[in-house]
Image (cartoon, helix red, strand yellow):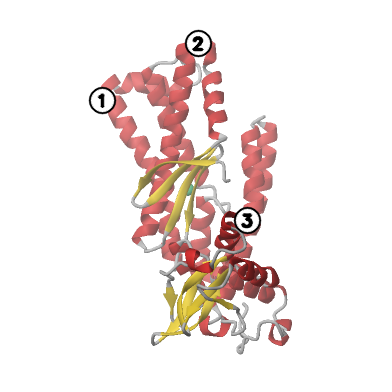
Amino acid sequence: MSWSWSFGRVAGIDLKVHASFLLVLLLGASQWGGFGPSGAVFGAVLTLLTFASVLLHELGHSLVALAFDIPVKDITLYPIGGVARLGARPKTPGQEFLVAVAGPAVNVLLVFIIGALGGWWFGFETLWNALEQVRAEQPSVVTLVALLISSNAVLAIFNMIPALPMDGGRVLRAVLSSLMGPAKATRVSAWIARVLALGLFAAGILARNPMLSVVAVFVFIGAGQEVREQQFAHVLDAIEVGDAINPYAPRLTPATTLADAVAVLTMTHWDAFAVEQHGRIIGAATRKAILEAATREGAYGYVSGIIDRNVPTIAPNERLEAARVVMSSRGVPYVAVVRDGAFLGLLTEADLLLIADRLMRNNKRWGESSSAPFPRTPTSRN
Ligand SMILES: [Zn+2]
């Protein structure tokens, strides 16, 4: 249960809104509630239109990402802003720069479009007056337009603060990456972000703006996550898929009972298993599907009912990072490693996490591991 509702689809991207958004709507309505019921409606409409701007901002990121063949899982609107979840990292600093800049660019565009339309409709002088005293205005259509212009300007400027993981931070990281490589650029950007976050937090307290302080906390935590994610991707980029296959991974058959399947998964860490029939791989079954089917059908059901026969494939000489991208773009936690039509093994999301975790914690001990005999140890770790 994620507490989010889907409300539409654009270019194959699921648009979702988090349940807590209802609170923001109420808050928006109550802020203008002093003007009576029409004020409350005004506040709610303003909130909806502001979040429509946030949605367009996220679509800006997403459509540029899609243009670079970077899958976009979904866009979710939270009270604090929107999040577009990308299925892969931009491949070059140039791509990261353009994906990051696209969001704020949409807001700049909206400032000019809404400004031009509003000026044409109300006259530029009326609109300018409304903009100058936007907080003291009565709720009216020209106030609504003025507030939308100013909120889009704030969205563009605020997001360009060079603090990872905000857009400005990604732009900074992209520029630094082309100078010092992605690993160092991420570390430097993260430190700049932490310093800026402390400043934002203090500013939020001084200006009595709790939202600003909350954003500062998210930035501070997010900066650390960016460093870990970059290390994760770096580690996965150093290893070939063929070297990560575990030859001892158990396999199931369509005739395996759910009871036997549950017994297998309680003894192992894998989140998916290859299913074979007459010595040939016909699909995969996930831990989740096995547990759900066992709950539904009892122990005497069979694996045959829960086989995914459309397993994505990857060649053994590809990198683990590529395997991760395949998994996330297909929305499944596994990929079959296939060479010349022959099945070599199933690589799962749990394998990636385990491998990256071991490498990131202790590069040396990894080679001596007995439970996962990987023949090659990566040499560079930056
Ligand atoms: Zn953005």
Q: CA distance from mark 1 to mark 2?
A: 28 Å
Q: Residue furthest bottom?
A: 375
| Relative side of 144 to 190, left or right | left
Residue 184 can be seen in this image: no
Q: Secondary structure at mark 1?
A: helix
Q: Is residue 370 left or right of residue 78?
A: right
Residue type at numbered disc 1: Trp
User: Residue shown at 50%/10% (left/top)?
Assistant: 36
Q: What secondary structure is found at the residue carrying circle 3?
A: helix
Marks 1 and 2, the one that precedes in the sequence: 2
Which amino acid, mark 3? Ala
Dot 2: within a 10 Å radius of its alpha carbon, few (fewer than 14), some, or many (20 or more) residues?
Answer: some
Q: Three-letter amino acid code at disc 2?
A: Phe
Extreme residue in the top direction: 36
Q: For this rendering, which residue is in front, 257 or 333?
A: 257
Residue receiving disc 1: 120
Q: Nearer the viewer, residue 122 or 347?
A: 347
Q: Residue at x 51, y 57 (%)?
A: 170
Give whichever of discs 2 and 3 has the lower sequence position: 2
What residue is disc 3 on? Answer: 223
| Residue 179 coordinates in the image, percent (x, y) | 51, 70
